[in-house]
Image (spheres, rainbow, N blue to C red):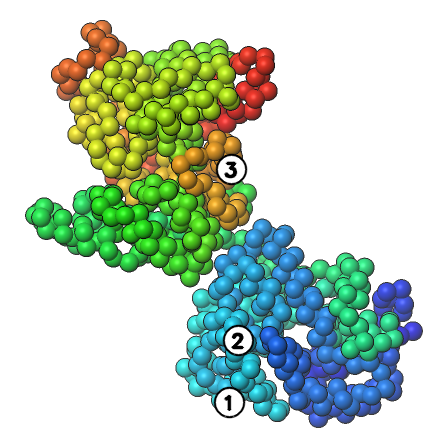
């Protein structure tokens, strides 16, 4: 029978004697705690070596290497040198290997868990290897070594700073971090570490270090990386509402056994000293025993909260007035100067969104960051002007701990539509265009179904109607065209560049050979023949189409930001349904969100894409550039359904469309069609005096927000456009493409 003794500076109340089997041999393991008494520990080690095959020395500072510098702890050296007859270890090698494996395990099992987390190390030098492992996933590292070792209220902010500190620092003989903390640190310095703990997402340290500055107000919701957690320690973490405790020491026995003891048992098994073993030999034993970290949930409920950021900006001078205390009667020439000044302001946090919970249990929170430029100002400057502000916003998002950032409104179309920003940003970027395309067609399909002016075809057949996409060569427009080509008898792709349109047409026909696709650069004469129009230009307020030429009862989905059809244009045609793309309703009541011009709990699809990716733990560049991939449109649509996203009640420039208002549009359209001449401009259609008014966004929010009618619920699971069977030679490809619409 092998005998292993551990002498530790830890509490004697955790002493034990354990008879067990390990690596095919019987062991007797004894632990002796000395309650921090170094002299007692030295004497025990001197006596117990005569009765042991290996000895572990626990809860003392290891010798460790920081960069190229090896730090030797003199107290530990005194304790280990007294043992001369048998192998002795502090568990340093095994602890280092288990720490790195723990980080890898959690990152893999919990889905990019450490990406851009704020991590506070109570001692970076003692945990250098785990710091290097975490540095692969986040740059937000801080180290409290100077505070604990010198009393200086200074935190190191990078691995490079830690290595520089180690080169210039000599550990004082007999120094005890906790004693230094309690005796040498003024309250202000202790508060410095406590505040850093409150801002961190992850804290690395032993129990005594964490407890010395930790409490419920700065530990709630945190993740702790520590070792050899006892029940009384877990109770403290529960009291502080700690979210997750990662115990790097595997639980092999009923008794809590520290890393030093485990390494001593391995040395006893091999009959060799610690310095005679390579890391590979320890790794073989770790693999054989299948050692994994313990993931403990003190509160009984684990919350994996992912974090995002999203960039917004004012769409006009009116939006600037809403965001700042500027009188409504301010002269135009003054507002012009204010608009120019706002464009040069640094990015600012507009609000923080919290309590976004998926039906899967995943959670997300994030920040809306505003840049001051209106589309007019962005167009007045070269793209680099906007790039710099978006990159500054990305730096701000990274510093706050965001794991992905989305571009909203006009910021996603400036320059190369996010490509340059994604390449230079310190975190993944998405424009949200995939979900915008999906949401636009989702909303258009639902609107056409509710209006009932176009008959629903038999399953597998195309809709007997014509559709047009204005701005078809853009990212959202091209995907919309692809999907509409599968569902409508004819699709007109319109834009300014005929060459790009012809290339898009060829690409659509490659995927859908039986589709009828027409290119048009001068499309005014065709407006009166369209049953659906999707407009997704970057015209920034320029007149894109003449609404007086649009067919009565046409559904226009305006995806552009700013809108291609301003309110005054929409008001001319009460017989046409103009919707502001497909807005998305969140699965839970969000907290902390300020108004973005939509009913409560309703967001734009581009923002929804960023949130869905965060909930899924997909911290990656998803949608950038002007060529949005239909596969990603399909994927984000399905992920949205998975995480409880629903199509909001259909909204226009005046607010949410009620069933009564849609019915009124249908009535006016039917009446107008009796005298419609196919697109010639005429007098505006006048709505009857008793026509149901549009519901304002404020009123909609007061009455429960954008509650969809009963049919809307069905729309969340029904196909977007209706599919038609493809020719046999293209049937397989057709079925795959049609799934996108579903």
In this view, 716 is above or below 375: above
Split into 4 quadrants, where in the image is the N terminus? Answer: bottom right
Task: Work out whether mark 2 precedes mark 3 in sequence or the reverse, and give the earlier one.
Answer: 2
Q: Nearer the viewer, residue 124 or 595?
A: 124
Which image quadrant is residue 152 in?
Answer: bottom left
Q: In this image, 530 relative to 293: left or right?
A: left
**SS at mark 1?**
helix
Alpha carbon distance from label 2 to label 1 = 24 Å
* Image mark for residue 162: 2
- Is residue 422 rendered to the left or right of residue 389? right
Q: Earlier in the sequence, mark 2 or mark 1?
A: 2
Marks 1 and 3, the one that precedes in the sequence: 1
Circle 3 — which element?
A: helix
From where the camera sits, is residue 304 visible? yes
Query: What whole-number distance in Å separates the C-alpha atoms at marks 2 and 3?
Result: 41 Å
Spot occupied by residue 668 in the image (x, y as percentages of width and height): 23, 15
Residue at mark 3: 639
Please name which of the two marks, 2 or 1, marks the residue nearer to the observer.
2
Determine contact: label 1, label 3, CB under 8 Å.
no
Q: Is residue 159 above or below residue 369?
A: below
Image mark for residue 183: 1
Residue at 21% x, 53% y: name it.
342
Q: Secondary structure at mark 2?
A: helix
């Amino acid at each position: 029978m092998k005998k292993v003794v551990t002498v530790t500076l830890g509490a004697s109340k955790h002493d034990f004697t354990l008879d067990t089997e390990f690596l095919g041999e019987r062991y007797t393991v004894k632990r002796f705690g000395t309650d921090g008494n170094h002299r007692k520990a030295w004497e025990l080690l001197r006596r117990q070596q005569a009765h042991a095959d290996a000895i572990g020395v626990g809860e003392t500072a290891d010798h460790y290497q920081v960069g190229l510098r090896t730090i030797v702890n003199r107290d530990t050296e005194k304790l280990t040198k007294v043992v001369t007859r048998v192998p002795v270890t502090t568990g340093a090698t095994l602890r280092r290997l288990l720490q790195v494996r723990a980080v890898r395990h959690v990152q893999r099992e919990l889905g990019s868990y450490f990406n851009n987390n704020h991590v506070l190390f109570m001692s970076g030098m003692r945990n250098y290897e785990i710091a290097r492992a975490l540095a692969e996933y986040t740059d937000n590292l801080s180290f409290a070594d100077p505070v604990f070792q010198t009393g200086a209220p200074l935190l190191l902010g990078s691995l490079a700073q830690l290595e520089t500190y180690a080169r210039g620092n000599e550990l004082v003989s007999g120094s005890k971090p906790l004693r230094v903390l309690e005796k040498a640190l003024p309250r202000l310095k202790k508060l410095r570490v406590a505040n850093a703990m409150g801002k961190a997402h992850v804290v690395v340290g032993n129990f005594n270090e964490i407890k010395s500055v930790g409490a419920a107000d700065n530990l709630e919701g945190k993740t702790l990386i520590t070792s050899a957690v006892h029940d009384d320690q877990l109770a403290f973490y529960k009291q502080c509402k700690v979210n997750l405790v990662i115990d790097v020491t595997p639980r092999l026995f009923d008794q809590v056994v520290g890393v030093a003891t485990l390494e001593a048992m391995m040395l006893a098994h091999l009959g060799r000293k610690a310095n005679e073993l390579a890391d590979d030999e320890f790794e073989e034993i770790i693999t054989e025993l299948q050692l994994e970290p313990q993931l403990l949930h003190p509160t009984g409920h684990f919350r994996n909260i992912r974090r995002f950021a999203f960039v917004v900006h004012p769409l006009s001078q009116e939006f600037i007035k809403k965001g700042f205390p500027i009188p409504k009667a301010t002269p135009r020439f003054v507002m012009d100067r204010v608009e120019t000044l706002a464009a040069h302001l640094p990015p600012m946090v507009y609000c923080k969104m919290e309590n976004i919970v998926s039906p899967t249990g995943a959670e997300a929170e994030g920040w809306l960051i505003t840049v001051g430029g209106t589309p007019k100002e962005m167009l007045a400057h070269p793209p680099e002007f906007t790039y710099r502000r978006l990159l500054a916003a990305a730096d701000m998002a990274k510093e706050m701990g965001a794991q992905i950032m989305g571009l909203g409104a006009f910021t996603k179309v400036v320059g190369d539509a996010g490509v340059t920003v994604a390449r230079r940003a310190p975190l993944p970027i998405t424009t949200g265009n995939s979900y915008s395309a999906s949401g636009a067609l989702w909303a258009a399909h639902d609107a056409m179904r509710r209006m009932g002016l176009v008959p629903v075809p038999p399953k597998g057949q195309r809709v007997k109607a014509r559709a047009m996409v204005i701005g078809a060569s853009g990212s959202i427009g091209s995907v919309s065209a692809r999907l509409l080509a599968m569902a409508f008898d004819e699709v007109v792709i319109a834009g300014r560049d005929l060459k790009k349109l012809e290339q898009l047409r060829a690409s659509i026909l490659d995927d859908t050979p039986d589709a009828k696709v027409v290119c048009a650069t001068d499309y005014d004469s065709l407006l009166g023949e369209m049953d659906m129009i999707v407009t997704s230009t970057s015209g920034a307020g320029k007149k894109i189409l003449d609404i007086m030429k649009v067919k009565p009862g046409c559904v226009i989905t305006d995806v552009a930001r700013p809108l291609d059809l301003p309110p005054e244009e929409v008001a001319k045609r009460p017989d046409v349904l103009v919707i502001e793309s497909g807005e998305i309703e969140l699965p839970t009541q969000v907290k902390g969100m300020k108004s973005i011009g939509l009913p409560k709990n309703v967001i734009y699809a581009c923002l929804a894409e960023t949130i869905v990716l965060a909930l899924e733990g997909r911290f990656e560049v998803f949608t950038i550039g002007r060529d949005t991939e239909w596969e990603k449109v399909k994927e984000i649509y399905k992920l949205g359904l998975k995480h409880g996203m629903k199509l909001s009640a259909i909204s226009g420039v005046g607010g949410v469309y009620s069933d009564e208002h849609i019915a009124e549009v249908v009535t006016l359209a039917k009446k107008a069609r009796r005298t419609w001449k196919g697109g010639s401009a005429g007098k505006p259609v006048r709505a009857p005096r008793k026509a149901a008014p549009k519901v304002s966004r404020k009123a909609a929010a007061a009455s429960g927000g954008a509650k969809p009618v009963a049919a809307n619920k069905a729309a969340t699971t029904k196909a977007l456009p209706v599919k038609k069977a493809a020719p046999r030679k293209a049937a397989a490809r057709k079925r795959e493409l049609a799934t996108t619409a579903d």
